[in-house]
């Protein structure tokens, strides 16, 4: 039996998480693994983790999270789109598929389904749950002491803002999805959730503004998704919107997964196997 697995927020700069990744193994030689962003903060650590996984799974797909895109102010370190493209080049050298590659067709158990890795970012529009505009939601986040590190280390170069980079990525992905083969359902994969609903689980609602864009709120129905896969929230749950299954697949930080009782730390089944 072939299984499509997914896991995000590996954060292998933590020793305990590095051990988890080193021990990951497929259940068969036909299994695929979606790696849904936030592998690590450094390009070297991203390369280590993806090389480990690409050597074990029949196919590995990667989408970036915000942590891969953080620039640490080191000499000659790429930032913005250049950093993203450097990561794409690294993945291609390992045989790992990225949002820049043709979408592969999963034909194993639970298929067929077109697996679409996406890189869409966020545009602060989820902040509407706490304020009327970006300035207001940022002010509330600063007052609460809940400010994403992206505000200091995620640079949008050459775009004038993260919002503009997000909108450009949404336009590109939307055009590609519109050209998909007729009648073939999708598995939509993005580090950030495609709609605001999952962010209602956040303890600090001020953080939602860094979690996605309302531009994709209907993509799960519009593009006939069987499953939507995401991470970023560090709240691994299965939820349903308009009859479509959403899977948050974060591993998260050791202090988080060590105390969870409702889910085991490790890959989640998306299609095949014992899918929800």
Image (spheres, rainbow, N blue to C red):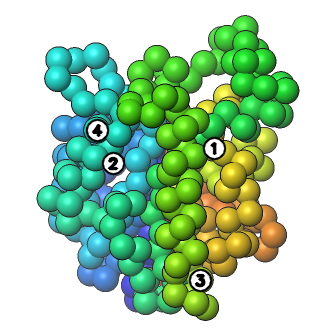
The quadrant in which residue 224 appears is bottom right
Marked residue nearer the N-terminal end (2 or 3): 2
Residue denoted by label 3? 185
Q: Secondary structure at mark 3?
A: loop
The quadrant in which residue 26 appears is bottom left
Between circles 1 and 4, the one closer to the viewer is 4
Q: Is residue 114 above or below residue 207?
A: below
Residue denoted by label 1? 212
Q: Of 34 and 25, which appears nearest the observer?
A: 34
Marked residue nearer the N-terminal end (2 or 1): 2
Whether the residues at callouts 2 and 3 have beta carbons within 8 Å, the answer is: no
Q: Residue at x 23, y 44 (%)?
A: 86
Q: Of 212 and 215, which appears nearest the observer?
A: 215
Q: Which dot marks residue 82?
A: 4
Between circles 4 and 2, the one closer to the viewer is 4
Q: How far apart are the alpha carbons under marks 2 and 3? A: 32 Å
Q: Which dot marks residue 20?
A: 2
The quadrant in which residue 135 appears is top right
Confirm whether residue 239 shows in the render: yes
Q: How far apart are the alpha carbons under marks 1 and 4? A: 21 Å
Between circles 2 and 1, the one closer to the viewer is 1
Q: Secondary structure at mark 2?
A: helix
**Few, some or many residues within 10 Å of mark 3 (<14, 14–19, 20+):** some
Between circles 2 and 3, the one closer to the viewer is 3
Residue 268 spot, x, y in % from top left: 51, 63
Whether the residues at callouts 4 and 2 have beta carbons within 8 Å, the answer is: no
Between circles 3 and 4, the one closer to the viewer is 4
Residue 140 spot, x, y in % from top left: 76, 15
């Amino acid at each position: 039996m072939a299984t499509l697995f997914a896991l995000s927020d590996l954060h292998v700069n933590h020793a305990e998480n590095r051990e988890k990744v080193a021990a990951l193994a497929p259940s068969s030689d036909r299994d695929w693994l979606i790696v849904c962003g936030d592998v690590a903060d450094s390009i070297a650590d991203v390369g280590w983790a993806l090389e480990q996984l690409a050597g074990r799974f029949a196919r590995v797909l990667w989408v970036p999270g915000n942590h891969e895109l953080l620039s640490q102010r080191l000499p000659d370190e790429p930032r913005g789109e250049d950093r993203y493209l450097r990561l794409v080049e690294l993945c291609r050298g390992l045989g790992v598929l990225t949002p820049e590659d043709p979408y592969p067709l999963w034909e194993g158990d639970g298929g067929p389904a077109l697996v679409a890795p996406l890189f869409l970012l966020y545009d602060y529009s989820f902040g509407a749950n706490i304020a009327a505009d970006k300035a207001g939601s940022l002010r509330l986040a600063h007052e609460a002491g809940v400010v994403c590190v992206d505000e200091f280390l995620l640079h949008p170069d050459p775009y004038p803002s993260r919002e503009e980079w997000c909108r450009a990525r949404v336009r590109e992905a939307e055009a590609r999805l519109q050209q998909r083969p007729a009648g073939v359902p999708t598995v939509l994969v993005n580090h950030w959730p495609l709609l605001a609903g999952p962010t209602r689980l956040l303890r600090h609602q001020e953080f939602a503004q860094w979690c996605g864009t309302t531009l994709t709120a209907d993509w799960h129905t519009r593009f006939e998704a069987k499953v939507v896969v995401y991470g970023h929230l560090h709240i691994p749950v299965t939820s349903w919107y308009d009859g479509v299954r959403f899977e948050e697949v974060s591993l998260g930080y050791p202090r988080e997964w060590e105390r969870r009782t409702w889910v085991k730390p490790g890959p989640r089944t998306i299609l095949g196997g014992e899918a929800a």
